[in-house]
Image (spheres, grey):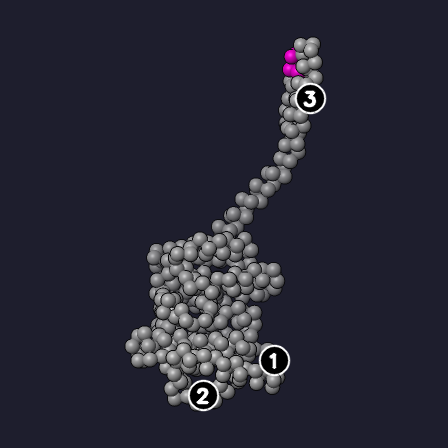
Amino acid sequence: MRYLAIALTALTAVTVGQALAQDNGEGGAVTLVSDQIILIATVVGAVATLPTLIEFLIDRRKRKERIALSLDDLAVADLEVRLAGLDALLADIADLIDRAKHPEAYASLKIGNEILIIGPAASGKKTLAQRIAKDAGMDRLIIVYNARNADALTSAKSLLQRYRRHKVMLLLPRLDNVVEDEDEEILAELDALIETTTGRSNVQVVGTAVDFEPGGLLDNMFGIVLALPGTPVKHAREHPIPDDARRMLVEVARFYLAEAKADGFALIGLDEAALVDRIARTARNPADVADIIVLAETTALHRQRTGIAKSPVINDEIIEKSIRRVIVTPA
């Protein structure tokens, strides 16, 4: 700053000297001096704001560096996925992979494209997500390594908007760390990102977590939960459902089952009244009921598409699988 002051003093002296030297005795010097004073004032203002500008540029560079560390945008075709020991799980979620690969075949189903993978540390959650992206024929994989970084979440959303003609997986690892921090603003931004993204047929949202509480924040953010072998699951907090709320769940189950039947899905080997009671006793809220039934429809459509069944039928096995995907219980 000392050198800036010296330079400014020298500039002032030179400017005044030039103005006086150009005085022709006809009042021109007055106008010229005024112009030079305006110039000096402009320079002084620029010098005064220089530290703020420098600070802004440094902060901007640091933000870009943090985003670069927190965010990856990868071509799925370039991924080399090495996954072992989860063949049974991959076979079990073949319908979910098929839905992500051929969303047009499941367009009639009203379900979000979000999956939460839970499991012990270093158990292959992220690798499983990459394998799903490969098998589903995704084009891009956007990974937000640090979902606690609001700038990274914003950048991820911008990338998703850019890839409207591509099939994209948004991977959000270790979301339990975000929940643990209890930053309401970040949680709201994360929930908004998932909510606004999951309805797009070309996007598959996958989150991962080590610590998971049934009925907790993460459970509410994701409609489908896949538990890897050995997953530690906390016991859910007891929230008894009042009788009137339970009766409402019965009506909701009847409504969605009636819609499924009207859309051509048949109940095979199931007593409808018993099925309604089973779903209503298991579900915690209307969203659970809707998820259970639409996941059953997903599996039924997949069985028809792959020739296992001639028509979309829902049986007891399909219902139990759907319930396991929505309601995670401690082992």
Q: Main secondary structure of the magenta part?
A: helix
- SS under mark 3: helix
Question: Foreground residue, 14 or 121?
Answer: 14
Residue occupying image coordinates x 37% and y 82%: 313
- Asked if the stretch drawn in magenta spans residue 21, the answer is yes
Tell me the number on the disc at residue 208. Answer: none
**CA distance separating discs 2 and 1:** 27 Å
Label 3–label 2 contact, CB within 8 A: no
Instruction: Count residues near mark 1 (Cα–Cα under 10 Å), then give few for <14, some for 14-19, many for 20+.
Output: few
Residue occupying image coordinates x 37% and y 67%: 104
Question: Foreground residue, 12 or 24?
Answer: 24
Residue occupying image coordinates x 58% and y 62%: 188
Q: Which residue is mark 1?
A: 239
Q: Nearer the viewer, mark 2 or mark 1?
A: 2
Q: Please tell me which of labels 3 and 1 falls first in the chain.
A: 3
Q: Nearer the viewer, mark 3 or mark 1?
A: 3
Residue 256 visible in the current orientation: yes
- Asked if the stretch drawn in magenta spans residue 127, the answer is no
What's the residue type where badge 2 is placed? Answer: Glu
Q: Which residue is mark 3?
A: 34
Residue occupying image coordinates x 54% and y 82%: 249
Residue 97 visible in the current orientation: no
Q: Quadrant of residue 297?
A: bottom left
Q: Please tell me which of labels 3 and 2 falls first in the chain.
A: 3
Question: Foreground residue, 217 or 101?
Answer: 101
**CA distance separating discs 3 and 1:** 78 Å
**CA distance separating discs 3 and 2:** 92 Å
- SS under mark 1: loop
What's the residue type where badge 3 is placed? Answer: Ser
Q: Which residue is mark 2?
A: 272
Q: Which residues are magenta?
A: 18-22
Give residue 133's position: percent from left, percent from top.
Answer: 38, 63
